[in-house]
Image (tube, grey):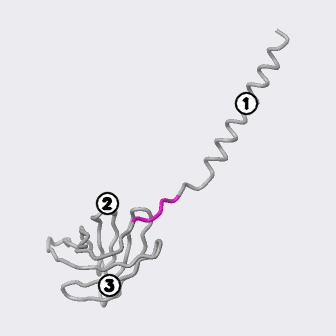
Amino acid sequence: MKNCPRKFSLLLTAFLVLILANAALAQQPPEERPPVNVAGKWTIYSKDEDGRTATKYIDLKQDGNTITGHFKGPNQSGGLEGTVNGRHIMFRTKTRHVLTFRGMVDGDSIQGKFHILGREGTWEARRAD
């Protein structure tokens, strides 16, 4: 019976060490995944909120999380720039009427939403090469 307080003390100490170790691990930032590879030519199929569809083309270059490239749509063309974080992609065209595309990459396809002049629509892209 004399060892009971000591055993309790050891168990309590071990329990506190486990709690503190878990708390320290919980405060570490989550591991960031490397960005997916989106470099290359893509064909975009878009649909605006009025139901109109259009086909657009992008040619992407990638340096880590940064993407640059060229955009060609039915009414305008120009450069583009954006980012890839994990599987999430975002880019803006450098055109008279700026389009902003956001989406999720899944292998050789991307799906998401786009915005232009206060309006939005959906888009899907397929890798062309």
Horizontal arrangement in the rendering, residue 1 relative to residue 122 (left or right):
right
The answer to whether the residue labelled 1 contacts the one labelled 2, judged by CB atoms less than 8 Å apart, is no
Callout 2 amino acid: Asp
Callout 3 amino acid: His
Q: Is residue 114 above or below residue 27?
A: below
Distance CA(mark 3)–CA(mark 2): 21 Å
**Label 1 Cα neighbours within 10 Å, binned few <14 / some 14-19 / many ≥20:** few
Does dot 2 land on a helix, a strand or a loop?
A: strand
Residue drawn at 85 percent across, 11 percent down: 2
Asked if the magenta segment contains residue 34, the reply would be yes
Asked if the magenta segment contains residue 55, the reply would be no
Callout 1 amino acid: Ala
Question: Which of the image's four quarters has the N terminus?
Answer: top right
Q: Is residue 81 above or below residue 65?
A: below
Q: Mark 2 highlights which residue?
A: 106
Q: Position of residue 89 (x, y in %)?
A: 38, 69
Q: Mark 3 highlights which residue?
A: 70
The answer to whether the residue labelled 1 contacts the one labelled 3, judged by CB atoms less than 8 Å apart, is no
Circle on res. 124:
none
Horizontal arrangement in the rendering, residue 81 relative to residue 122 (left or right):
right
Residue drawn at 22 percent across, 74 percent down: 43
Instruction: Give, as a single range, the part of the protein colored magenta.
Output: 32-36
Q: Residue furthest right?
A: 2
State the image quarter where residue 108 is shown: bottom left
Q: Position of residue 55 (x, y in %)?
A: 18, 77
Q: Mark 1 highlights which residue?
A: 14
Q: Is residue 6 above or below residue 90?
A: above
Q: Residue furthest left?
A: 52
Residue drawn at 34 percent across, 63 percent down: 104
